[in-house]
Amino acid sequence: MTEAHRPLSGQKAIVTGASSGIGAGIARAFARAGAAVGINYRSGRDAAEALVEEIFREGGEAIALGADVSDEAQVQAMFGAFLGAFGRLDILVANSGIQQDAPFAEMTAAQWRRVIDVNLTGQFLCAREAVRTFLAQGAASDGPSRAAGKIVCMSSVHDVIPWAGHANYAASKGGVAMLVKTLAQELAEKRIRVNAISPGAIRTPINREAWETAEAEARLLALIPYGRIGEPEDVAEAAIWLASDASDYVVGTTLYVDGGMTLYPAFRGNG
Ligand code: NAP
């Protein structure tokens, strides 16, 4: 990749939940785009370390960072370890997320809390640490990009599409949507840009049962006007753009990377 194609050159980024799926795709793409990357994992240490090795082999810089994003002390230790290794932070991609699905009448309080803890409180804790770091680093002119810092939160099309059987997940992502807008409004004057990506159906372990059989894939494709399931690389391209100076005037938006899933596909053919 030429320098012109390395839009994150010299920047330092933490990607949470980068041991798998979308986060791993973003970490790999960020490294190729020139960023040094902190690869956060919770249980997938081997996968995170393998990705660090892969990035080294390609001439990039990375470090594996174990932390449960729902745990305040672990999040603070993770940012400390990252700053110890790379000295500054320019980008946070708050991507870690889980599903614990159940019909609403059967959903336990533990399932509700765990999903809110990881998907929403985890984003709060990581974003707060990132903002504290950006503010401590000071004026944008000192850093490698026009903004003083960038945060990209991983939301979901289920921040606008209700999802039966997933009340905890949909509520967590609806919360992320307002968290992002509010942070963006509050922090823009500090030249900190906060935006979100809302993926549709992306082929990762989180939704394996939705695409691994031909029947399941056909049901899923009926919801996607563009006619294919998304790949982590589709989301990574959007994350690079939102984290780079190419989107310097983009503040508080949610970019839907969903093949048209939010376009009420059930209405196709009724025009
Ligand atoms: P995935 O392959 O299951 O990856 C989830 C990642 O989150 C893993 O790296 C996992 O780490 C990490 N994680 C889970 N709990 C954590 C915790 N407590 N602390 C730190 N990390 C934790 O799923 P994915 O599809 O890539 O999902 C990534 C994000 O995209 C999620 O926020 C999800 O809601 C969102 N999303 C996905 C889709 C989709 O279709 N795939 C659509 C919309 C939104 P370990 O494995 O190391 O524990």
Image (cartoon, grey):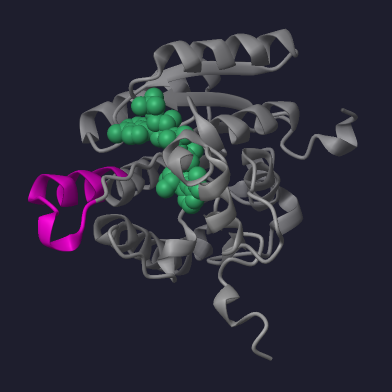
Query: Which of the 4 image quarters holds residue 33?
Result: top right
Q: Quadrant of ligand 1?
A: top left
Q: Position of residue 148 (x, y in %)?
A: 57, 48
Q: Where 270 falls versus 211 (above or below)?
A: below
Residue farthest to the bottom, as pictured: 271
Q: Between 257 and 263, which is closer to the camera in this rendering?
A: 263
Residue 108 placement, left or right of 28: left
Q: Is residue 202 visible?
A: no
The segment highlighted magenta reads 102-118
Residue at 64% from the left image edge and 88% from the top image edge: 270
- Does the magenta run of residues contain 106? yes
Q: Where 202 falls versus 251 (above or below)?
A: above
Q: Position of residue 183 (x, y in %)?
A: 41, 62
Q: Position of residue 199 (x, y in %)?
A: 55, 54
Residue 116 placement, left or right of 198: left
Residue at 31% from the left image edge and 55% from the top image edge: 169
